[in-house]
Image (cartoon, rainbow, N blue to C red):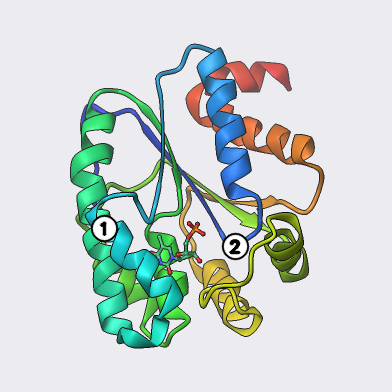
Amino acid sequence: MSNQQARGKLIVFEGTDGTGKTTQRNLLGQYLQNQGYPVIITKEPTEGPYGMKIRDLYRHRNRYSREEELELFLADRRHHVTEILHPGLLDGKIILCDRYYFSTAAYQGALGLDPEAILALNDFAPEPDLVLLFQASLDIGLQRITAGRGETLNNFEQREFLEKVAAIFSTIKRPYIFNVDASGPIEDVHRLVVRYVMDLLQPAYTAAQD
Ligand code: TMP
C-alpha cells in the first residue's frame, strides 16, 4: 500500500457490526481534541456519491453481483482517499476512520471473493498507522444493533454471514493491527483505545508511565 512522506496519522477502527467502533472513535476524537491534536473524524462507506448506492445495496443486496458490490466499495474508497485521506495526511492531521479496506476483505471476502486479492486491489489507499480490531461476541454485537439501537438487521448483519466476516478479520495479520476486547464497559474499552493510540502518538510519554 502506498505511504505518504510528510504525513499525519491514519487510525482505523475495524470489526463486525455492533462492537462499539463508532462510539469509541467519537470518544477518542474528543479526547485527542482536548489534548490539542488536529483530528479528522471520518468513515466508510462515506456520505459521498457512492455512499447512496451502497445504502441501496444494504436494502437490496441480491440486486448486485458480488463483483459489483466490491467495485462500489472500491469506488467509494478512491473518492475518500482523494478527497479526505490524502489531503488530511499531507496536512499532518490525525485521521480516525470507522472501517477501511480490511472491512472490504472481510465482508466481500465472506461472499466468497479472495480476501488477499481484495487487499491487493486497495494498493491505491494509504496504509494505516494503527488498526484497532474490535472484538466482541456476535451475540453482544447483534443485541446492540437490535435492542440497543432499535434497528432491524440489514443484509450485512445476519449471524451466519458475520461469523464468516469475523473469521476473515482474524486471519489478516499486519504489524499495526491490534485486537481490542470490546465486550466490557465503554470506559474500559476507551482506556484501552487511548493506550494504543498514545503509544503511537507519544511513545516516549507512554513508556515513561510504565
Ligand atoms: P457501518 O454499519 O459501519 O456504516 O457499515 C455499513 C456496512 O457496510 C457494514 O455492515 C459493513 C459493510 N461494509 C462492507 O461490506 N465493505 C466495506 O468495504 C465497508 C467499508 C463496509
Left or right position of 23 against 112:
right
173 in relation to 28, above or below: below
Residue 172, how many percent across, how many down?
Answer: 48, 66
Query: In the drawing, what numbered circle is on residue 17?
Result: 2
Left or right position of 44 against 3:
right
Residue 4 in view, yes or no = no
Mark 2 and mark 1: span between their CA atoms? Answer: 19 Å
197 in relation to 101, above or below: above
Residue 19, how many percent across, how many down?
Answer: 66, 56
Residue 104, how many percent across, how many down?
Answer: 39, 67
How many marks overall? Answer: 2
Residue at screen point 57% across, 68% down? 170
Query: In the drawing, what numbered circle is on residue 76?
Result: 1
125 in relation to 105, above or below: above
Give 83 or 210, whichever is nearer the viewer. 83
Few, some or many residues within 10 Å of mark 1 (<14, 14–19, 20+): many
Q: Ligand 1 is located in which of the four quadrants?
A: bottom left
Residue at screen point 26% across, 68% down? 72
Three-letter code for the amino acid on which mark 1 is drawn: Asp
- Label 1 C-beta lies within 8 Å of the nearest ligand 1 atom: yes
Three-letter code for the amino acid on which mark 2 is drawn: Asp
- Label 2 C-beta lies within 8 Å of the nearest ligand 1 atom: yes
Residue at screen point 70% across, 67% down? 142
